[in-house]
Image (cartoon, coloured by chain):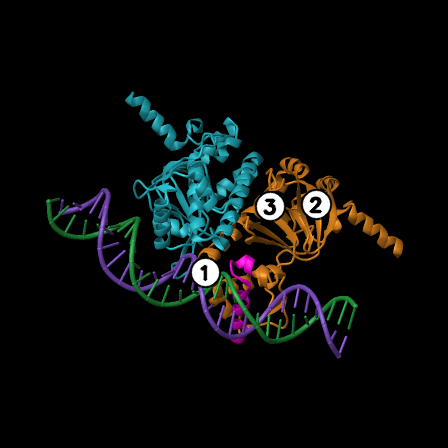
Chain colours: A orange, B cyan, C purple, D green
Amino acid sequence: MRVASLVANVYRRTMKDCSLCVVRNSAICAALSHDELSALSQLGRKQHVARGQTLVWEGDDAIIVANVISGILKVSMSIADGREQIVGVVFPGDFIGRPFGQKSPYSVTALSGAELCIFSRSNFDTFARSHPALEHKLLQRTLQELDRAREWMLLLGKKTATERIATLLLEMSSRMGATGCSIEENELNEFALPLDRQQMGDVLGLTIETVSRQLSRLKADGVIGLPDRRMVSIQDRRRLQDLSAAA
Amino acid sequence: MRVASLVANVYRRTMKDCSLCVVRNSAICAALSHDELSALSQLGRKQHVARGQTLVWEGDDAIIVANVISGILKVSMSIADGREQIVGVVFPGDFIGRPFGQKSPYSVTALSGAELCIFSRSNFDTFARSHPALEHKLLQRTLQELDRAREWMLLLGKKTATERIATLLLEMSSRMGATGCSIEENELNEFALPLDRQQMGDVLGLTIETVSRQLSRLKADGVIGLPDRRMVSIQDRRRLQDLSAAA
DNA sequence: TCTACTGTTTGATCTGAATCAAGGAAGATC
DNA sequence: GATCTTCCTTGATTCAGATCAAACAGTAGA
């Protein structure tokens, strides 16, 4: 048994067999045949990143891209004086990095420990250009990400603090429910937030105090429960939806 | 001469010859060979839209996509009670619509009279899937649009009113300067805003009064000139850059 | 068990931008 | 050239959320 698990481990580390990958069907790799996949796997390596570690720095050369196997990461941009906006939250199966661009306009940082499948950007770019099905998946994903970014622009430009918090909770409920396994469209009613209060503020364009006050109020009104710091339970989803000012 | 110009006109209307198109080299069509282009042109039609006309409604079926030949359009999202956020401004050579999606999550409305090259989404999707070079261009453009959306999220989430106005003026100066002709990276120091005060507010997440006050102040401080309602002249670009809190 | 530390909540006060409210200017229409 | 109409500016006031300030859990170490 020890030998078998060791071998399996080596296989995973060197990415000799992507068919065992837990995000095989949800990541963009799903576009590739077995042979293409093994060609791609030659270019990549599996790597663990610790919570808090920054993979890509805003303004630096965009030297890597990656698929997220497990863990959650943030995509952020900031102003010289330190103000920071989180412009994206990345889940397992998602793609990170800026393909086909010299510089990364944003930073990518792990919010939890995470397992990634990393490629050099130039290698990935070349491979993608000769595999239209992969580029198509990437296009679909980018279009979806753009939709999400625009919806967030509506939130940041026009919504009140209460509406923002409600929207975030619903979004998290939905994205954390859609873990990998294809069509499974279940929305969680209880989940651990991948963000602390400060990070929630940085996603929502609010301060930590406002986030805390809004959460306390939703709890007092019986809309949600807060069993502990990270855990949220949605007790009245309908009301939360009304409060989110759904477009 | 009259006969010749009539013929040319018919050619343009039916898109029999895209090689005469003014955005031939800046639009995604630049990815296509002469033969491919004429195949694509069979699927599309050229159409004029009047200022104020909405081509696509938020939430409706995404039935068309288009290239912008001339004119400027806005992409917007709104909340049921009427609050509206402009999530994109579209210039000649840009692509509009939501390919590979059933519904359009946003509206597209002409801010000026505009000339478009319109395709049914399903036809375009099919064509694109079999022309990787076209999809690649579209991917590049979508990635760029995502970068822009994220930069705007930083503005909406974290910047002050003054910083927002300064950023918008610089962005307009740069995008209006980059008209079509490839590498020409000139930033205009005097230009007509394609947006009225209300629309500037809707882009920036500010009210019309705040926009007006901020512009008045920049003018009083000698940073910009406002020859008339629509015209802006940048008199001290360096200072405008400082005020924009460039990341 | 005490202490330190980190993240969170709650309260008091302040402020930047929103809202409310007139006016003013430049076209368009008659 | 008078009267709308539309868009813009400016002033007065309000308010949602920021800032400032303190206290309160958990958790980790010593």
Q: CA distance from mark 1 to mark 3?
A: 27 Å
The residue singled out by tag 2 in the image is A118
Looking at this view, is B151 or B6 the one in front?
Answer: B151
Disc on res. A159: 1
Which residue lies at the image location 54% right of the left edge and 49% below the top edge?
A79
Q: Can residue A221 be found in the magenta stretch?
A: yes
Q: Can residue A1 be found in the magenta stretch?
A: no
Looking at this view, is A4 or B120 the one in front?
Answer: A4
Question: Callout 3, which amino acid?
Answer: Glu
Position of B85 with respect to A30 (left or right) is left
**Magenta-colored span:** A201-222
The residue singled out by tag 3 in the image is A58
Name the residue furthest top.
B1
From the image, give the main secondary structure of the stretch colored magenta.
Answer: helix
Q: Secondary structure at mark 2?
A: strand
Q: Does A241 sit above or below residue A86?
A: below
Residue A190: where, in percent of width, then height? 62, 68
Report the mark closest to the observer, 2 or 3.
3
